[in-house]
Structures are given as C-alpha cells and as structure tokens.
Image (tube, rainbow, N blue to C red):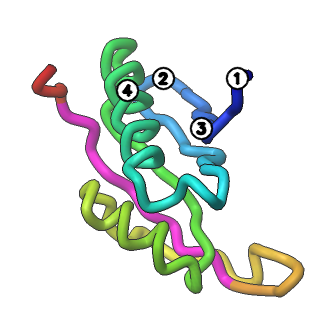
C-alpha cells in the first residue's frame, strides 16, 4: 500500500519563488523528509532560473524555523496577525538558491 509521507508546494515567478506549503505526516517528522523535499524543490527551481526563495512561517513553529535556519533562510520581515486560529504573526524568511552538489 502506498502512503504519502509529505509534500511541498512552490510558486515561481521569474527568478524568485515562494514555498507555499511543506508538510510531513506527524509519525514521520524529524526523519529528514522536509529537508529532502526542500532540497529537491530548490534543485528543481535552480534548474529553471530561480535564485531566491521566500516563505512565511508562524513565529511559534520552532521545528520549521530550525530547519529553515539550517537551510540558510534569513528574516526579511513580519506580517502582523497573518495567521488565524490562533491569531499569530508570520515571519517572512528568504534564502538564495545555490547550485546543488549532486
């Protein structure tokens, strides 16, 4: 039986892109799946000319923030009360996409 362990969604406009969503099934988190999805997405984006990737993340999402910081994302701004249920600010992060090693 096949099972979806995770997915990622990117939106590209010219040489920039946004990571719209990345998710991993709860029982498979902390196993490198999100990192692999992000690496694969960046590899594909770089191949079509994207050089900068943006995203928004809940400021309380510490596991995601840890992954993004390790990946080279840096703070660019804040969107006040961006999220609902519960209401929370979003941090806007960005990183340069570089050629992959493999």
Marks 4 and 3, the one that precedes in the sequence: 3
Q: How far apart are the alpha carbons under marks 2 and 1?
A: 35 Å
Q: Nearer the viewer, mark 3 or mark 1?
A: 1
Q: CA distance from mark 4 to mark 1?
A: 32 Å
* Residue 66 vs residue 2, the one in the foreground: 2
Residue extent of the magenta highlight: 89-98
Which circle's residue, 2 or 3, is located before the other in the chain?
Answer: 3
Q: Are marks 3 and 1 in contact (CB under 8 Å)?
A: no
Pointer 2 residue: 14
- Residue drawn at the location 48% of the way across and 67% of the way down: 64
Q: Earlier in the sequence, mark 4 or mark 1?
A: 1
The mark closer to the camera, 2 or 1, is: 1
- Label 4 SS: loop
How far apart marks 2 and 4 lie (CA) works out to 7 Å
Query: Pointer 1: what residue?
Result: 2
Q: Residues within 10 Å of mark 3 (few under 14, many from 20)?
A: some
Seen in the picture, residue 12 relative to 82 is either above or below; the reply is above
- Taking the image as shown, residue 17 lies to the left or right of residue 95, namely right
Between 16 and 33, the one lying in front of the other is: 33
The residue to which callout 4 is attached is 50
- Name the residue: 62% across, 39% down: 5
Q: CA distance from mark 3 to mark 1?
A: 18 Å
Along the polypeptide, which appears first: circle 2 or circle 1?
Answer: 1
Q: CA distance from mark 4 to mark 3?
A: 16 Å
Sequence-earlier tag: 3 or 1: 1
Q: Residue 50 appears in which quarter of the rendering?
A: top left
Q: Give the labeled residue for mark 3.
A: 8
């Amino acid at each position: 039986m096949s099972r979806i362990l995770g997915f990622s969604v990117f939106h590209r406009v010219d040489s920039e892109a946004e990571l719209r969503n990345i998710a991993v099934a709860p029982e498979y988190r902390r196993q490198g799946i999100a990192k692999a999805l992000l690496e694969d997405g960046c590899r594909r984006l770089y191949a079509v000319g994207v050089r900068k990737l943006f995203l928004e993340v809940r400021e309380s999402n510490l596991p995601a923030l840890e992954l993004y910081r390790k990946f080279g994302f840096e703070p660019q701004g804040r969107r006040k009360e961006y999220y609902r249920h519960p209401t929370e600010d979003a941090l806007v992060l960005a990183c340069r996409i570089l050629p992959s090693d493999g």
